[in-house]
Image (cartoon, rainbow, N blue to C red):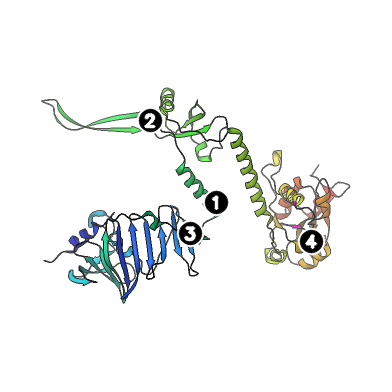
Amino acid sequence: MSMTWPQIRGLNYSTMGRSVRADMWCDDTFTGRVWFLPPTTWRIEDAAGEATYIENDTDEYRLADDGVMVHTAKSPNRFVMTSGAAPWQLLQAYATWPLEDSGTEQRLVPTGLPRPVEVRGRAGWQVQLADAMPGGEVTYVIDAELGIVLSRSIGSQVMELAKPHFDEDFDPALFTWIGPVREEEDRFITPAQREYEAKAQALAQMPRPQVAWLPRTIEVQPVDGDPRTGAMDLQVTAQYGYLTLRQWVTEVGEPEITWMQGQTPLRHREAIGPWTFEIRSHNLIDSDDCARIIGSIVPADPPATTAAQIREMLDRDTAERADAELSEMLGTGRHLDDYLGDRGGDSLFIRTDFSNGAAWREVAAAAMAAGEGDESEFMACLTCIDNPANDGLSISDLLERIGDRPPYYVFIADTTTITDPEHPILAVDTGPADSGHGRGQTVRVIPSQMWSIENNLSLANMDFEDFADSAGPDGVYRGFS
């Protein structure tokens, strides 16, 4: 008895959500075995029985060319593109043919009637389909009994399944890896994204308070009835106002609020036990309702560490983050010649004294800090050159290396900068003399005024002489009087 394509497709739909184990063949060659536990748990082995791919709820492992598994932590923000033959093209083929009435455009359209065939000892129905994607026509064979795809052919490439087994209880150890591993380097993921994803994973594991009551508005709409008898059918719906519930350990103190949450009006704040709870919402919520929401909360257990220990940890994290940001800004190892000529638009801050690393970091941080008071929105935009190759670099040698190319000014952290209590930074006019520059002219500037000289020189609002003329008797510019 013949079957239609909708019947065969429905047979394949019946495999959704079922665990399966099978042998894999490609172009008439045995290539290994596959285990699949829906929705996203896999194990793939090669013909020798060695694992080449493992995936579970949180992690993914792929065998690299050097024989080492490459590990990737799974993330909802990670995009993966695969090419070539892969077992999911057989085991999850149902994802490629949505129902006609689903509103989704049909990618695969049958071009002929199904016909019975046999694949590695199992009876199936062969269907040829036109592929809307580049590639032309693809042929599937669907098992006549089990509904699983036994074969997928595109051109001369044929991928097949053999010995399929459904609904087995797999050993969880199949989907773990304990051998050698290295972490995948993804150049498309920024450190900030990795930090965000790590935080999201940690938040998912945290105990959370349970809110047992919310205010609601009940709406009743008649849908049928009889005015003569009083019979009535009502559609009853309940609407809840959206709100944000914040919590923190009272003794630790309120955490910094995000900009978006800070724009949401504060409706209520109340301490219960060790916790402080806060309700924010763009919807008006009655104060009594707010109190009832807070009163309904089943709080989670607070952290086991003391408030003092938590504050110490937070202070340490803040210091480490600031230190890491400064290290990145210092640009250790940068080559000066890479920033001369066409790159001359940068305001260079060159380290030429390497006697005290801590003092250099202190000076650089102060030089790139925001101004004070009314000048708090200004800061120096410096490209630091921290390379021992410039140790002891003289002004004459620097001018010779620059020649008549940009930059037309530089800043230097020399021995005086490092050792003097005020840490005055040496500013040097490096522009060509024939264009009005006082080539080789210098003035020193204290770090807290770096924003003033750097901003004005970079925008050509002022000349080098304006700052030299405003320096004190000791040749140090400390701001305009």
Q: Which residues are magenta?
A: 346-357
Q: Is residue 458 left or right of residue 274?
A: right
Tell me: residue 199, above or below residue 45.
above
SS assignment at label 3: strand
Question: Which residue has dot 3 on it?
Answer: 71
Please name the amino acid that badge 3 sits on: His
Q: In the rendering, at what x and y percent does residue 16 appear?
A: 27, 56
Q: Earlier in the sequence, mark 4 or mark 2?
A: 2
Nearest to N terminus: mark 1 or mark 2: 1
Q: Nearer the viewer, mark 3 or mark 4?
A: 3
Q: Which residue is mark 4?
A: 391
| Real-space CA distance between mark 2 and mark 3, rounded to the nearest whole angstrom | 41 Å
Horizontal and vertical percent position of residue 196: 51, 48
Q: Quadrant of residue 63?
A: bottom left
Tag 2, which secondary structure? loop
Q: Which residue is mark 2?
A: 212
Toward the viewer: 40 or 157?
40
Quick check: 242 left or right of 362? left
* Image quadrant occupied by the C terminus: top right
Question: Marks 4 and 2: which is nearer the front?
Answer: 2
Image vertical order of residue 367 relative to residue 391, above or below: above
Left/right of residue 123 with respect to residue 298 in the rendered view: left
Q: Is residue 61 magenta?
A: no
Mark sitting earlier along the chain (4/1)? 1
Q: Which residue is mark 1?
A: 192
Mark 2 residue type: Ala
Q: Verify CB contact (< 8 Å) between mark 1 and mark 2.
A: no
**Label 2: how many Cα within 10 Å (few below 14, some 14–19, many 20+):** few
- What is the total number of numbered labels drawn onto the structure image? 4
